[in-house]
Image (tube, grey):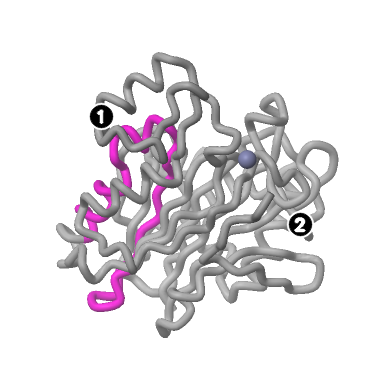
Amino acid sequence: MSVPRSDFVAQRAGDLMYYTVPRFAREAGVIAAFSSRRGGKSSGPYATLNLGLHVGDEPEAVLTNRTLLCGALGVDAVHLVSCAQVHGTRVAVVGTADRGRGAFDQSRALPATDGLATGTPGVPLVTFYGDCVPLFLFDPVNRAIALAHAGWRGTLGRIGARAVAVLGEKFGTTPAAVLAAVGPAIGPCCYTVGPDVAALFVGEFSSGNRAVLNPEGGRLDLWSVNRQVLLEAGVRAENIAMARRCTACNPKEFFSHRTSGGKAGRMAAIMALE
Ligand SMILES: [Zn+2]
């Protein structure tokens, strides 16, 4: 079986491994990365680079892992801004006053929020993943960034388009200027859904595109649907990088909520303006 081409590249720093987007890296002053499970200090189902404080792992190990990853990225771990993700479509704009929210204590993360945006340098955004789709957005013209967490509900609710709209409202972002990336997530190879969820997607994305949904197999392609959502929002095709890496069929590389029976660590998407 051939491995699909990825627009992300693996980076190593000691034992740590994470992914970056070369298209973003060519722009000065923006950091964007997605972690793997390699190179951290957690054990058991969280081995090793679990970055989620909310999944039952030892908090000390998680904080050590966050410090390790942030150190490699050049981001201050104590300033991370996170949100309590609820599979909704709320995208919050954050700034200097929000620095550190959820960095040490999950209860201080922004409540009921699945996307974060900022135009302020030194305000690193972080969102967490255990199969859902990480969306990265960067407006190099107005210097603004956003991260969004898109599981099937967020995808169906077009959180990617919501994030593009928030950048437009708050920072004057033009969709055609946006650089976007769709990160590692459960792929069309593995993501089976029931007929009820399949029907929702067929109704909402009635393109009849078999790349989006294969009704016979009951498999949903969240990568492609999120790409379509971004295209509909005005992001240019050539500006959308696709990781094309499945979290469910690469257990050495990624945590997978689905294939672990629910007890798993979390990867992180991190973005920051320098
Ligand atoms: Zn897979």
Mark 2 closeness class: few <14, some 14–19, many ≥20 residues within 10 Å? some
Rendering coords of residue 41 (x, y %): 81, 54
Q: Can you identify the residue that label 1 sits on?
A: 204
Quadrant of the snapshot with the C terminus: bottom left
Instruction: Say which quarter of the image contains residue 113.
Output: top left
**Residue in the foreground of this view, choosing between 148 and 24:** 24
Q: Is residue 111 visible?
A: no
As for residue 254 lying within the magenta part, the answer is no
| Mark sitting on residue 38 | 2
Locate residue 128 relative to residue 234 in the image: left or right.
right
Q: Secondary structure at mark 1?
A: helix
Counting from the top left corner in percent of width and height, residue 244 is at 54, 53
- In this view of the protein, which residue sits in the foreground, 45 or 83? 45
Q: Considering only vertical position in the picture, is 254 above or below 136?
A: above
Q: Which residue range is magenta in the image?
A: 138-167
Disc 1 marks which amino acid?
Glu
